[in-house]
Image: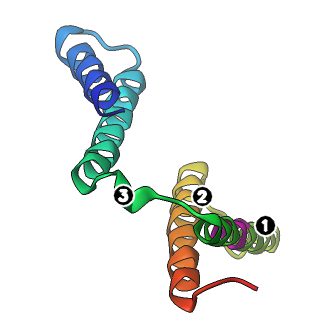
Amino acid sequence: MFVLGILLTGIGLAEMILTEDITSPQLASSFVSMGVVLTILSGLRLWKGENNYMQDERTKKIGAYGLSYSWFLTFLVLFVIFWADFLHLWSPDVGTLSVLLILLMGISAKGFQMYLFRKGDVD
């Protein structure tokens, strides 16, 4: 994954630098974004070692519950946003809504998992 991340970053940067008239800069920036994320995540995993990523039944269960709670929270937020738009209280554009939901899902999933790990187990 580390090599793939570096490769994707290189392809995106090469497309940005070598192509004078970029008709679709989103493709090049997508390659760079994916490559940087892959490089960082796999680099941290290589740096910490594989021993920290051992999973047993408890960690898998806590991870699944955390993701389930995050999904349900996102579902409730979508419900609230629907009613806010329907009642003309707040009507977000697509970009704002996408960023809001992506951040909500990622942060809440990690937050729920951290809470459940500190709690000890799920019932």
Which of label 2 and label 3 is nearer to you? 3
Residue 38, magenta (yes or no) = no
Disc tally is: 3
* Disc ID at residue 51: 3
Image coordinates for residue 28, horizontal then vertical, percent: 34, 23
Could you say which is closer to the camera, residue 114 or residue 27? Answer: 114
Three-letter amino acid code of the residue under disc 3: Asn
Q: Earlier in the sequence, mark 2 or mark 1?
A: 1
Q: Quadrant of the N terminus?
A: top left
Residues shaded magenta: 66-71
Residue 102 vs residue 33: left or right?
A: right
Q: Which residue is label 1 attached to?
A: 82
| Circles 2, 3 touching at the beta carbon (< 8 Å) | no
Q: Earlier in the sequence, mark 2 or mark 3?
A: 3
* Disc ID at residue 70: none
Figure quadrant of residue 14: top left
Q: Judging from the image, what secondary structure is the residue with disc 2 in?
A: helix
Three-letter amino acid code of the residue under disc 2: Leu
Could you say which is closer to the camera, residue 52 or residue 119? Answer: 52
- Tag 2: Cα neighbours inside 10 Å, few (<14), some, or many (≥20)? some
* Disc ID at residue 97: 2
Vertical side of 113 occupied by 16: above or below: above
Q: CA distance from mark 2 to mark 3?
A: 38 Å
